[in-house]
Image: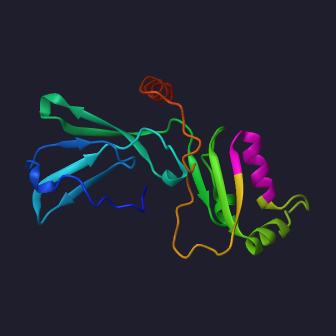
Amino acid sequence: NDLIVSQGGVPLSLFPPDSPIYSGHFHKPHTVTAARTAPGVAVRYVGSPYQTSLSEAGQEKELLLLDASRGWELVDTIPLSVGKRYHRIFSASQLLDLDRVVAKDRVVVSMTRDDLDGAKREKSNDGGASPFDAKVKQLRKLGASVEIRETKVAPLWPISAHGSDGGDLEDLTPESTLKAFLEQE
């Protein structure tokens, strides 16, 4: 989760400097450093190979390519796009701009009642359904799950418009994840 900072664990100062260190558990790929207390130490969290919940909306996943003959040096990162993706939407314009959605993706639209009513009242150029309703219909026809949530207040901070709440995890094994990655080439 992008909003949680770990308060425990092993201090970076216990790791050897200038050695590649890779770890798991955290789903978001990222690197942790502490230049003042652990100079030359960097712990690279590999991250999960696919989004597992709505809290990972917008996170780009990757495969790390390491070279054993070069001391496990990271030589390449390969973007991964396997499994269901999650998308968080907080405005009609974000929904209308949403692309890269495929079957089985989950789109969660959270807007105030006033904003939802306004988006649904807008008329299309041809006088048909509102652009908002037409986009929801298009996404559902594509096979994506679209959930509309009414919120009491609009968000007060910038939020990514991409990526479940954990109740609907993908059933991808390591083998099927690799197979899905190889098939996307």
Residue 69: give x, y in percent of width and height: 13, 28
Identify which residue, 131 or 56, lies in the foreground.
Answer: 56
Q: Which residues are magenta?
A: 133-146
Q: Position of residue 10 (x, y in %)?
A: 18, 52
**Which residue does the image show at 63% across and 55% down from the upper left?**
98
Q: Residue 143, relative to residue 164: is it above or below? A: above
Q: Residue at x 48, y 51 (%)?
A: 56
* Image-quadrant location for residue 134: bottom right
Residue 140 covered by magenta stretch: yes
* Quarter that holds the N terminus: bottom left
**Left or right: 45, with 90 as reference point:** left
Q: Does residue 58 appear anywhere in the picture? A: no
Question: Hey, which residue is sitting farthest right in the picture?
Answer: 127
Q: Is residue 156 left or right of residue 13?
A: right
Majority secondary structure of magenta residues: helix
Numbered marks: total:
0
User: Please, which residue is most extreme toward the front here?
Assistant: 8
For residue 93, above or below residue 175: below
